Image (tube, rainbow, N blue to C red):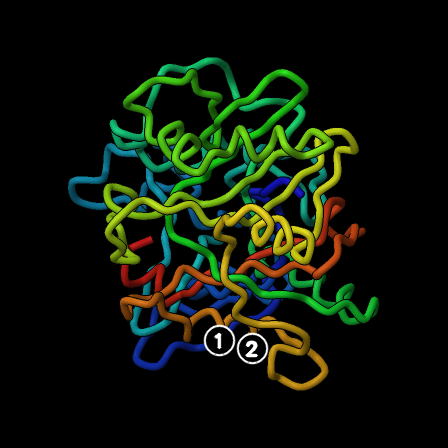
Amino acid sequence: MDRKLASIQTILSLAPIPGADNILAAQVLGWQCVVRKGEFNVGDLCVFFEIDSILPIADWNAHLRKGSDVNKPLRVKTIRLRGQLSQGIALPTSLIPDGVTYEIGQDVTELVGVKKYEPVIPVHLAGTVRGNFPTFLHKTDEIRLQSVPEVLDEVIAMGIVLVGTLKMDGTSFTAYRRDADFGVCSRNLDFKETEDNTYWKIARKLKLEEILRSEPVNLAIQGELVGPGIQGNRLGIKEIELHLFNLFDIDTGQFRGYSALREFGKKHGLNIVKQVAEGDFGFGNVPTAARMLETANALNYDNGTPAEGIVWRPACEVYSQVLKSRLSFKTVSARFLETYKE
């Protein structure tokens, strides 16, 4: 399911914030955000901007940009206002053109000129580009549970057992073998092999080409590179490591589930992402978004720093009618986001 950075949504609830006279806590989808008092009533439509949206310089968002940022595009981050956690921005629909009927859930990202924030790639992770990310593969970008809270109803109705794996705070890595061709990619680019490219160094160190060529079908593996020089090395490890989270069958166009990934990692001596939850998540028989977020918020990496969160998938692959794709979503730790100003 493609992420909607800006979409038409409904104000589901409004609540006072202790000690705050001019702002209210609003619920949009599964998100909590702060809005100006008097701007909305419960049930009103709004334009909701998710975390990591880059808002253009425009009159409709001028009140959100202050000081040195007044002439800069605005990145939507997790913040606290008067102690209230706010994740996302809800603004009146008056900022979009009149005379058009908008539907709840409609994507208006392009209409309002919003872009997605992408971290700057460090020099040692850049390289000589062979091409764009291959079209026969899928980019790694899980949707957050708060954006599709109804997916939990689907999970419960289907009786699915989910596996929660630790979300590693690094940079996306893909290696693939397609017939005679072997390639190594970042999130968006396919790199030529050069001596100084970190992606290729890891591929050669782990003998990924030999591993993929030893398999009887065309496969791609995807994971997270973590360690020195990557995202500030928040895990505090001494050398760059690769932790796999996806195994993709190129011939069939299908992902293989966590169980198959675990067997693949064991067979070839490769790290896979750590399992941190399973089944009913320890919450009883009915999982809730709040409880799953609490679990993510409580996690730490081995060095004691807040973990980024959890990726949730079934042990065996399942198609989601809600997501219109594989059943896979994430809960990102608010503690992590606040700690690192994300």
Real-space CA distance between mark 2 and mark 1, rounded to the nearest whole angstrom: 5 Å
In the rendered image, the residue lying farthest to the right is 158
Q: Are marks 2 and 1 in contact (CB under 8 Å)?
A: yes
In the rendered image, the residue lying farthest to the left is 68
Residue found 55% across the figure and 35% down from its top: 109
Q: Which residue is mark 2?
A: 291
Residue found 42% across the figure and 71% down from its top: 297
**Residue 35 in sight:** no
> With 201 as the anchor, is 28 left or right in this view?
right
**Residue 49 in sight:** yes
> With 61 as the anchor, is 246 left or right in this view?
right
Q: Nearer the viewer, residue 230 or 143?
A: 230
The correct choice, above or below, for 52 with respect to 173 in the image is below
Residue 337 screen position, x and y as percent? 35, 59
Q: Amino acid at mark 1?
A: Glu
Residue found 75% across the figure and 57% down from its top: 316
Q: Which residue is mark 1?
A: 294
> With 170 as the anchor, is 324 left or right in this view?
right
